[in-house]
Amino acid sequence: MNVHVLTRLGLTASLLAAAASYPALTVAQTSSGSFGGAITEAHEESKQWLFTLGAGAGVMPDYEGGDDYEFVPIPIASAQKGHRFAELLGFHVTSNILNSKHWRLGPSLNFRKGYNNIDNERVDALTDRGNSFEVGAKGGYEFTLSKDRTLGLSFEVLADVASGHEGLLFTPSVDFGMPLGSRWDLGLGAEVTYASGDYMSHFFSVNAEDSARSGLDNYDADADFKSTAAHVLITYTLTPKWRIHAYGEYKRMLGDAEDSPVVDDEGDENQGFGAVAVTYTW
């Protein structure tokens, strides 16, 4: 099966990738198990456009580190010409501007949900924890291990530009892709995210005013590795144009994020995310 399916999941759970954002599925550009369409090697070298539209639904914590879950919509759209592409997954946009079989680099955008209208009343009482709009870049390199197996190494840097957390995030990741048969594809991946002090303070610190309002203990979160995650994506090809995808992610909060009363007292350091989606490619 000589298929180069570019896995461009941007869920975080990262969906992905991070559970605090709407699904920013952060999966590197590897060869199997994509939310996009099957891209043959001949198509990658051609000048034809390839488009994908789809929709899905997922379940995830209602805030990063929380233990109450909510359903979220997952819009999917992508356009590709040769090796270059742009893709929307959830509220996360990734792209590649390099016409290279192995190298990936392009701008990215992400919407990250704040602590607004969540079920936990104590966390909901915290002030100035609004939404963020992030811009940055994602890049990486894809190794061809065999005819139909690939390994991708990537990184993404995002910075808030809308007076939300006003911080930075750096996420390196590794992903593996392979077919499981003529109709099934598998994608596996793992990542870790380092967050700046501004990000950590926005989401995980509790100052004196917040402590009085919420009853949570005072806490000062510093820059740290905030989380690590592992995910699996299984894709079933119904026809050359229609595909069904199932995605699951486990995320573990780390460091100052894990020790914050927002997580340690009111939430859960163990985070889950699951989603199903259908896509159409032409």
Image (cartoon, helix red, strand yellow):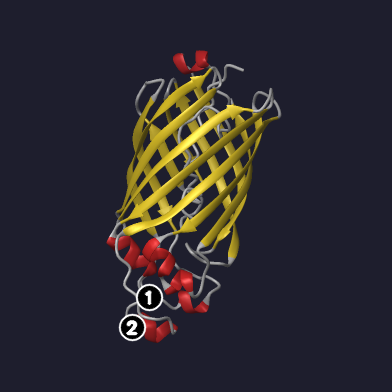
**Residue 223, quarter of picture:** bottom left
Q: How crowded is the residue under tag 1: few (<14 C-alpha within 10 Å), some, or many (20+)?
A: some
Residue 219 is left or right of residue 242, and the answer is left
- Alpha carbon of mark 2 to alpha carbon of mark 1: how far? 9 Å
Q: Circle 1 sits in a helix, a strand or a loop, which is it? A: loop
Query: Compared with residue 182, is residue 212 higher up or lower down, i.e. above or below?
Result: below
Residue at 43% from the left image edge and 81% from the top image edge: 216
Query: Compared with residue 158, is residue 217 higher up or lower down, i.e. above or below?
Result: below
Q: Nearer the viewer, residue 124 or 33?
A: 33
Q: Residue furthest bottom?
A: 212
Tell me whether circle 2 and circle 1 mark residues in contact (CB < 8 Å): yes
Q: Position of residue 163 (x, y in %)?
A: 30, 61
Tell us which disc is closer to us: 2 or 1.
2
- Which disc is residue 282 wearing? none
Q: Is residue 24 visible?
A: yes
Where is the C terminus found, in terms of image quarters?
top right
* Residue at mark 1: 127
Residue 56 is left or right of residue 20, and the answer is right
**Residue 260, quarter of picture:** bottom left
Residue type for callout 1: Thr
Q: Circle 2 sits in a helix, a strand or a loop, which is it? A: helix
**Residue 202, quarter of picture:** bottom left
Residue at 51% from the left image edge and 74% from the top image edge: 266
* Residue at mark 2: 209
Residue type for callout 2: Glu
Q: Nearer the viewer, residue 86 or 218?
A: 218
